[in-house]
Image: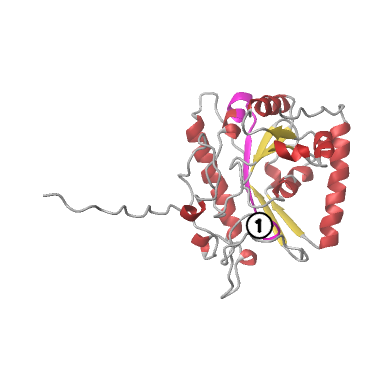
Amino acid sequence: MPRSPRSPRPGSRDRTYRAVVRSSRAAFRALRLDVRTTGAEHVPTSGPAILVANHASYLDFLFLGVPAVERGRYPRFLCREPIWHTPAARVLDAMGHVPVDRDAPAAAYLRTRRLLEDGEVIGLFPEAGISYSYTVRSLMRGAAALARETGAPIVPGAMWGAQRLWTVGRTPWGTEPAPELRWHGRRVDVRLEAAFHVPPDADLVTTTRDLGERMTVALETLQREPHHQPRPGEVAPWHPAHLGGHALTRRQSRELDVVPRSAVRPTWGPQEPEPEQEQGPAGP
């Protein structure tokens, strides 16, 4: 039975959120973590909005909210329900975040819709998991559906750099990468693109493909920045293969990516040709 989150009293969510933001900023300074944002102006200062970005690390929720907070907004994130079975549950509830049970996601959708109708900003990662290839993988249609139903604009974006701190993946030695303990001087970039609205008669698959294209533009803009490039001769399993790194390719990552059947498959990003099927002997 999924856990039912407690609803915080009006006003208490932002008090808790502000305290967490202050603590996070202090931690970033102490660790000398360099977090930069571009495009914060695309987050509206009032009214609902849906922030979406790629999912490249276990820490992404710490960074996607930064440009929104710069605009005085406190986004409520959709997070996997198992996190509510950890000591973090009380803080997550107090901040107004939304648990998502992948086997029964309707409750999370309805609660998120109410938040948008109340003028809140929500944050979500439509890939529904971390991409092993560090490209934008298959996307769920929830962001498009919420935007179509509520009229809230989608603010597409991307993050890059946090994958060097703690993420999934495969090293050249076939192992999972260990969390990086030395954060000093690491750079994390968050980039938001212009918001767009989804018409009431929009097709969800077409809209989700458009979203995938916008997220890919934002992500590859960051991935191509000079300060994110591998050094000459460096083995870089944290950088995408199609941009010169040593991460898994999209085809290789399919064996590890857990993608729901309802997700929209990529028509965006690097397109790798399928391997040729072995031909049988020619007939008479």
Q: In percent of the image, x 55 and y 61: which residue is there? A: 247
Quarter holding residue 110: top right
Above or below, comparing residue 103 to residue 127 in the picture? above
Quarter holding residue 166: bottom right
The residues colored magenta run 146-166
- The answer, for residue 115, to whether it is visible in the render is yes
Q: Residue furthest left?
A: 284
Q: Residue furthest bottom?
A: 233
In the image, is 249 to the left or to the right of 86? Answer: left
x then y, percent, for residue 17: 84, 40
Q: Secondary structure at mark 1?
A: helix
Quadrant where the image shows the N terminus:
top right
Check if residue 35 falls in the magenta segment: no
x then y, percent, for residue 69: 78, 43
Q: In percent of the image, x 75 and y 30: which residue is there? A: 3
Give the labeled residue for mark 1.
Answer: 163
Give the residue type at disc 1.
Answer: Gln
In the image, is 140 to the left or to the right of 115? Answer: left
Q: In percent of the image, x 87 and y 30: which residue is there? A: 11
Q: In percent of the image, x 78 and y 66: which residue is there? A: 184
Check if residue 159 falls in the magenta segment: yes
Q: Residues within 10 Å of mark 1 (few under 14, many from 20)?
A: many
- The answer, for residue 197, to whether it is visible in the render is no
x then y, percent, for residue 10: 86, 27
Above or below, comparing residue 25 to residue 140 in the picture? below
Q: Of residues 274 and 38, which is closer to you in this image? A: 274
x then y, percent, for residue 176: 63, 59
